[in-house]
Image (tube, rainbow, N blue to C red):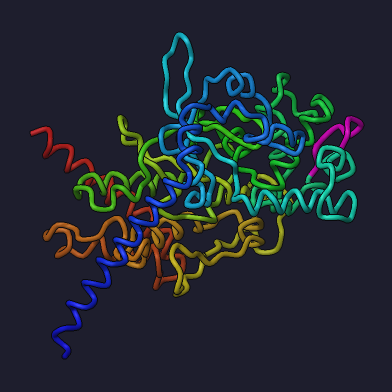
Amino acid sequence: MLRFLPLKLGRLYRCLKLLLVVGLFVILLMNTHNLFASFQKNELTDRRFINLNKCPACFGTSWCRKFMNGQVSFETWGRLRFLDVFNVKNVYFAQYGEPREGTRRVVLKRLGSNQELAEIDQKICKRATGRPRCDLIQAMYKTEFARINGDVRLLTPEVVEGWSDLVHCPSQRLLDRVVRRYAETKDSGSFLLKNLKDTERMQLLMTLAFNPEPLVLQSFPSDEGWPFAKYLGACGRVVAVNYVGEELWSFYNAPWEKRVDLARQLMDIAEQLTNNDFEFALYLLDVSFDNFAVGPRDGKVIVVDAENVLVADKRLIKQNKPENYDVWYESRFEECDREACLSFSKDSLCSRVTVDHNYYAICQNLLSRYATWRGTTGGLLHDPPGHIAKDGQLEALLDECTKPKKRYGRFQAAKELREYLTQLAAASSSATAR
């Protein structure tokens, strides 16, 4: 009887596949009219589709002329609305065209799921009227987003502290930077909040509270060497950023030399975001293979999801000297039954000058044998060549970076790991050159 079990399971699997194919075919038939309509119409010119009608409860208007002129259009699969059920994050690929420059690929984001966007509408309405539904535009003028009006000279920490990860512990220096570099205004360059129009102020504050990713990209731009995707603009509740390349996960089984180079870059990103001349520490609180991408030409690794980035002002910490501010903070490794989970204390990240969080996050969730993603284990540096595995140095450094045995061991291990990966990458380049 048992020998027939695999046959039965095989038949069941084939039946399920057939049902899935039939189901998709039925969906296509039911949506035939919508299917043809989707290919004929550019929905990105529809004010309601991009939620431009909800402004100033939106993310900006700097790219609206490009949207309305039809310069931005979905790529093939993005045009099929019935596939949105699978696109929970509301991230789309599109083509953007300029008459003299031709077309290029961009990424469009709604910055949240449909449910999350509906919830922010309900919160705005409840704060303004006490009811979950209302005239959203009128309601915005009765919220805290509007109370910070033109009479307020600066955006101050006590007003926005805790609104999101970006401003969990904001300094005045950080907020001045956010306002000065705000891209959704024609008169950017001033840190004075009063120089923004009322609608621009409300859009900035809503973005800061709902999903501050655009503000992270604007405040720490790729043009200045920060490892983030380039912010392009927004229209309504759709934000456009530069397309970087394939996600890091696509390189999980790439040749060893390629994976070593990517790992080296990831450790360099951890170092740059932790220690830089600006004395802002940018801590990555959500680290997974989906949140990084690799450039197709230069092979450069870039952070493509910056929603959960906590910024601590080291200069302010040194000035205020909170308790134990100069004691090195070690992130604690904890076993987890979920993918890409991290253990951290936001308050500790905000009150210590020397912190190992970024090294810990990159090593645990991306590089080491503890990294798990989409049912796999072993991390980006899985299955090293025989001579490297036999040497044991790489495994020892990864283990100490993830689950240190010595006090402050992760700091030293991260430093040595960066150096070791640099040596391996250089050796690979030399071998290729020969």
> For residue 23, which quarter of the picture?
bottom left
- Residue at figure coordinates x 21%, y 72% from the top left: 10
* Residue positioned most to the bottom: 1
- Residue at figure coordinates x 17%, y 89% from the top left: 2
Q: Quadrant of the N terminus?
A: bottom left
- Residue at figure coordinates x 81%, y 42% from the top left: 136
Count of numbered circles in the view:
0
> For residue 67, which quarter of the picture?
top right
Q: In the image, residue 177 lies at what x, y percent?
A: 68, 33
Range of residues picked out in magenta: 147-156
Residue 184 part of the magenta segment: no
* Residue positioned most to the left: 434
Give the camera-side residue of 203 and 163. Answer: 203
Looking at the picture, does residue 168 appear above or below residue 6?
above
In screen coordinates, is 125 left or right of 228?
right
Q: In the image, residue 325 lies at what x, y percent?
A: 65, 59
Give the camera-side residue of 416 and 144. Answer: 144
Residue 151 part of the magenta segment: yes
- Residue at figure coordinates x 47%, y 18% from the top left: 97
Q: Is residue 23 visible?
A: yes
Q: Quadrant of the C terminus?
A: top left
Q: In the image, residue 244 lies at what x, y percent?
A: 41, 35
Looking at the picture, does residue 14 appear above or below residue 190?
below
In screen coordinates, is 221 left or right of 361?
right
Q: In the image, residue 70 lies at what x, y percent?
A: 55, 20
Tell me the chief SS of the magenta region.
loop
Give the camera-side residue of 162 and 330. Answer: 162
Give the camera-side residue of 221 and 88. Answer: 88
